[in-house]
Structures are given as C-alpha cells and as structure tokens.
Amino acid sequence: MDDLDRAARALLRLPPSCGPVRLVAVDGHAGSGKSTLAARLSTALGDAPVLHLDDLATHEELFAWTGRLREQVLEPLARGAAAAYRPYDWRLRRFGEPRALPPAPVVLVEGVGAGRRAVRPFLARLLWMERGAEESWQRGRHRDGPEQAAFWEGWTVAETRHFSEDPSRPFADTLVRECQEGYEWLPGPRVTAGTDQIITHRDGFLSAN
C-alpha cells in the first residue's frame, strides 16, 4: 500500500478546490475498479469521505444527477459547510434519508462521470482508472451476476453515449493502472498536454513539487 500512502500525501499537499476541500474525482468505465481505489485511498487518507455517484443517480437518470450533486454537495462544501445528500435506493427505487458529508481536507467522489464537465471546476485532481471499456464491463457483469444482465445492456449504451458527449479521460491529471500488487500512476492527458501541474510523477508515484 506504499504507493497509496505516497499518493495520499501528495493529494493532501494540493491547494483546496471546493471551499476548504480538496475534491478528488475517481472516474473510469463501470467495472474498472473505481470503488476499490477510492476505498483504499480513503483508508490511506485517514478515512476520507467518499461520495459514490451511484447514490445520486437513479434508474431513470443514470447521468442526469449534476443538479443534485451541485445543490446537495458542491455548494455546501464550497461554503465550508457540511453537505447532506439523499442516497438513492436501487431496490426500492426512491431516495433515502439525508447522509452527511463533512468538509474534510480531502473528499473523494467516485463513479462514472465523476470528472465530467460540470464537476471539473470544483476538482483538485481527476484520476482515471486506466482499464478499457469492454474489459471493465466484463468485470462488472461478472460482479453483478446474471440477474443484472438487462440493466447492463442498457447501461453500456448509456455510458458510451455519455463519454462520447462529455468525456473525462482527456482531462485526467493521472491515469491509474491496477497491478497485481498496488497501482501504477501515470501522467494523464492533461499533464502530457503541457498544462502546469502541482503534482508531478516521479518513480511511478505521485509526488508534490
């Protein structure tokens, strides 16, 4: 987990991006390993809060959650206040009771579209899980089982449409490739395009200038 510890220290040295919060997005295809990376980064950051975008999406609005994200999460955090969002229950098909999200030094937002156009102005860092769509979807289908096959048929179409209209990867600061042990951290397209960066990449790890 040493690579995650180094990444966590680098993220903590970034300037705040949303009020007092360093908002860090973990984006990638469904099934690419975003939730696992976010959970491990959260642990390395001392249990940093993680917002799962599955909690803001619904069956009818797979990607039309930006209004809820802005009103329930981004605007309160930008004021330095605690956010409170209502997670969607995918079984009952309704929103639940409010769940608090404190303005911690680092808050992770994880999910397909976490680095989308409407969210990027609030981000301190955009991480992209570097795993192809087909491989990711195969992993996701295996994880969810045959009972979710119909959902996945609709999801892959919706995800493909979303990323064609509002891509995240071209704006990623860091590409994260899962290895047998740990992760490989690579400069993202935004870095290789020559944009001035606060985080550089040395020896395969994130490190602050």
Image (spheres, rainbow, N blue to C red):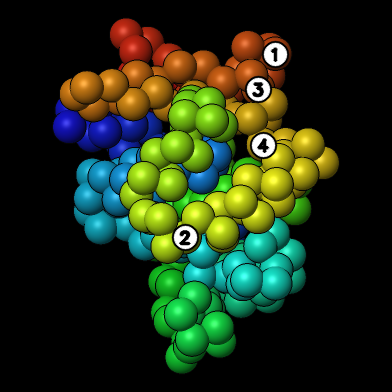
What is the C-alpha distance between the residues marked 1 and 3? 5 Å
Query: Going from the N terminus, do you reach mark 2 or mark 1 first?
Result: 2
Q: Is 128 positioned to the left or the right of 72 in the image?
A: left
Circles 4 and 1: CB atoms closer than 8 Å: no
Query: Going from the N terminus, do you reach mark 3 or mark 4 first?
Result: 4
- The amino acid pointed to by label 1 is Ala
**Residue pictured at 58% horizontal, 70% vertical:** 56
Residue 89 in sight in this render? yes
Q: Is 94 positioned to the left or the right of 4 in the image?
A: right
- Badge 4 marks a residue whose secondary structure is loop
Circles 1 and 3: CB atoms closer than 8 Å: yes
Residues packed near mark 1 inside 10 Å, few (<14), some (14 to 19) or many (20 plus)? few
Residues packed near mark 4 inside 10 Å, few (<14), some (14 to 19) or many (20 plus)? many
- Of discs 3 and 4, which sits in the foreground? 4
On the image, numbered disc 1 is attached to which residue? 193
What is the C-alpha distance between the residues marked 2 and 4? 26 Å
Q: Nearer the viewer, residue 143 or 95?
A: 143
Q: Say the numbered circle drawn on residue 168.
A: 4
Query: Going from the N terminus, do you reach mark 2 or mark 4 first?
Result: 2
Query: Going from the N terminus, do you reach mark 3 or mark 2 first?
Result: 2
Residue 54: image location, x then y, percent: 51, 64
Circles 3 and 2: CB atoms closer than 8 Å: no
Whether 23 is drawn above or below 182: the answer is below
- The amino acid pointed to by label 4 is Ser
On the image, numbered disc 2 is attached to which residue? 148
On the image, numbered disc 3 is attached to which residue? 190
Residue 65: image location, x then y, percent: 68, 67
Query: Going from the N terminus, do you reach mark 4 or mark 1 first?
Result: 4
Specify the farthest residue to the top: 203
- Badge 2 marks a residue whose secondary structure is helix
Residues packed near mark 2 inside 10 Å, few (<14), some (14 to 19) or many (20 plus)? few
